[in-house]
Structure formats: structure tokens, C-alpha cells
Image (tube, grey):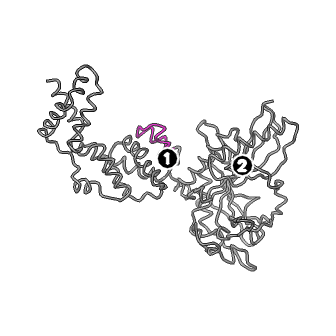
Amino acid sequence: MKYDIVCGIEVHTELLTKTKIFCACTTRFGGEPNTQCCEICTGMPGAMPTLNKKVVEFAVRTGLALNCKITRYTKFDRKNYFYPDLPKAYQISQLYLPICKNGYVELDSGKRIRIKEIHMEEDAGKLIHDGGTTLINYNRCGVPLLEIVSEPDISTPEEAAQYTQKLRDILRFCGVSDCKMQEGSLRADVNVSVKPCGSDKLGTRTEMKNINSFKAIQSAVENEAKRQIELLESGGTVRQETRRWDDRENTSCAMRIKEEAQHYKYFPEPDIPPLTLTNEYIEGIRATLPELPDEKKARYVGELGITGYDADVICSDLAYITLFEKTAALTNSPKDSANWIMGEVMHHLSASQTLPEDMDFPTESLGEVINLLNSGKITRPTAKAVFERVFFDGVNPAEYIEQNGLLLENNADEIEKVAAEVIAANPKAVGEYKSGKQKAIGFLIGQAMKKLGGKAAATEVSETIKRMMND
């Protein structure tokens, strides 16, 4: 029997606010354990939460970018459960009136993955299991989250990964989250079931928690669907449960029976009053929305003439976009700008294990190097060497080139002298060229460029050698 995959994803993203959702503690990542928490985010008796208005703004901003309807009257609810990383034994979240509903993300195929809702909530702490001992870090308690819940519209592992990646790109473009999956600021809970092809009856679903890479999301959907199919084919039944995904082993294991909403005993949050959002407030936020990823890619292809592949790569990170737009404006050559970013820039990032957002050289420097190359003032090897010093040391390109004598010297007499020496010293290569072997000219040019110390244009050297051999 053939089966269809049915998948829905709940994405949790930490918001880029300076302080937590209900208190003034910092949200900075990487602080010493239990130094960024207070009586409010740890739930001390009598502590009263105060809603961070920036969280509401970011939630509305996200909802608008994801084509959602914004709930004008919204409120918070208490989700009650006992677990060591939740010191007050409840989480303030939204169940009954989430702030955003009924949106969608459009995949490259044109298929729309519907978004059921987006709600605001606070994060829990973090448990560290070490040699039979469990340590608790409450710094993350109260960090503001958005939970973005899709409908079960995803039908392949590839769609699951692409949907999550498009969500990440939109969130980053909107400036609401850095979405650093390695730091846990974007995490996905993946719900998977299978059903006979063409059947309208959904199968029993399982949930895999806190998956933090696109590759792992795709693998989790693929492997869990395979596990369920094998179980059904062998006469077994799928149990509704929460499973832990093991990225190293590429498999999952059962954790606990899947909870339902009634198990959490939700009730309205008594300490935070409901919110009423006006049309003026919502439209004011809509007016600040940036050009979103798919719109920007289409403009780059249609107006700037770069390929769809180049646009995808450039739009994969805001740091690349900033550098590309600055460089293209300086050089008036979008294609050259894209090629250098995808070539030299990404090469140095990879070699130095630097994240794109951590690039700290002046953004105009890349454009200056490209302009010097395209104007014939330096050779391509020189341009690459100069940019390497720009990337790592932040040098000024023009000053570095002048100080190190790297400008091309268009001395025709010197080029002719060196060309004559190279021709005389390499009769075999000359003979091969004259017999029709065009590749031989490359060797002669290389020898001449070496003697000239790279201070001549390769085109001029080539023309000179060819002319002298043909005389």
C-alpha cells in the first residue's frame, strides 16, 4: 500500500527585544547561568508581570508579513504544567484568542502552507543533563517567543524544510528575530502522520520536539514517516506520542504520551489585561514592513539582471544583501558584485569560520576593489589578494595598492622586452603555438606575467606575445 505524508510544524522563535516579555531582565544570549532572571520571570510569590509592548508590535509585524488576520481583541492564558525548567509551574501563553490567525507561506512551487495561528508566549528555562546530574539555567525564562502554527498542509520532507526556511527568512527580514538556530532562537516541533493515498481520514500523529536545523527537519519527517509506515505494514498501530529526535543517529525515540490542551488546564491569565488593537496601530506597523525575500529576489532578477540562483544565495542572509546593494551601487555591475560575494567573500567566511553578520570590513571596500579591477588598474590576482587584506585587516584598498606598488604599469617597452625574452627562452611552446596548439600561449603569458611581477594587464601581454610570434 502507498501512503501520503501529512505534516504540520510549530515554529518557536525568540524575539529581538532587549528585555523579556513580562519583566526588565535582559534577553542577551550567553550570560552566566542564573544571572539574567528576577522574581517575575522565576515566578516568586506576589511578583506581577508587565507586558513588553515591543513584543506585541513584533507579533503584529510578523502576522502581517505572513498574510495573517490580526486579532483586534486578544488576551493571554495560563498553560499549567509541572517541569523543572518552569519555576512558576505555568507558562503565560495564548490559546483562545491568539494575536494572528489564518495566514500562509507560499513555497517556490506556488503551493501555500496555511498558518493556523501565531501566538505570543514566554520561554521556559534550560535543563543541562551532565553525568547523571541535571542543572537548571533560568536565564531563558521569560524570553519572548512567537509560536507559529501551520496547518497540516506539508506533504513531503522537502516541503517541511523549505517552509521553515522561508519562515526564517521572513522573520529575519522583518527584524523581529535573529533566528540563530544554533543558539535556539528558532526551534521547530514537527508533527507527522501517514494515511493511505487518497484517503480523507488522517492517521495518528506523533510530535518531535525542538529540532534546530533545516536538514534535521527534513530527515525527521522522512524517517518518522518511514517508521510509521513500517509499523502499519507489520500490523502494528501508531501511538500518539511525543518523540525525541536524535540528529546524530538520524532516528527518534518515544518520550511520553502526547498531551492535549485539556491536560494543561488553560484559564485566562488574571494578571495581564486583554489588548484591543486599533486599525490605526495595525496599519502603522504595516507601513513599516520591508521588502520581503521573494519580492527582493524577483526585483534582483527582473531589474538587476542577476540569475535566480544568484538572487537566492544573496538573499540567504541580510548581511549579504547589505553588502550586495552597496557594492552594486558603487560598481554599477550587479553581476560582478554577486560573483565576488559568492566567491571571495564566502570563501573567506568559510575559511575563517565567520558568520556573515560578523563581517566587519567597510562595505564600500569591495566595490572599490571591483572598480580598480574593471578599470584596468590592477590584475585579478592582485584584486583577490587586496580583498583578502580588506576582509581580514580592514585595509583601504587604494592606499594598500599604492603603498605596495601593485598598480599596473602600462610600459609598452618593458612588456616587449619581457615578451621577447620569454619567446626566446621557450622555443618548444612557441613551436606548439605556431603548429595550432592554442593552449601554449597560456604558458608563455604566465611566464611573462611572472617576470613583470603582475604589473601589467594580461590582455596587453597576450597581444604583445601573439604579435611578436606572428611577425
466 falls in the magenta region: no
Q: Which residues are magenta?
A: 295-316
Q: In this orientation, which residue lies closer to the viewer: 446 or 384? A: 446
Tell me the residue that label 2 is attached to. Answer: 190
Task: Please indicate whether residue 266 sits to the left or right of residue 342 in the image.
Answer: right
Are there few (<14), some (14-19), or many (20+) residues within 10 Å of tag 1? many
* x then y, percent, for residue 331: 32, 46
Q: Secondary structure at mark 1?
A: loop
The quadrant of the image that shows the N terminus is: top right
The quadrant of the image that shows the C terminus is: top left
- Residue in view at x 63 percent, y 72 percent: 33
Disc 1 or disc 2, which is closer to the eye? 2
Q: Secondary structure at mark 2?
A: strand
- Amino acid on which the number 2 mark rests in the picture: Val
Mark on residue 315?
A: 1
Are there few (<14), some (14-19), or many (20+) residues within 10 Å of tag 2? many
297 falls in the magenta region: yes
- Residue in view at x 33 percent, y 54 percent: 365
* x then y, percent, for residue 64: 60, 52
Task: Please indicate whether residue 33 sits to the left or right of residue 190 in the image.
Answer: left
* x then y, percent, for residue 467: 17, 27
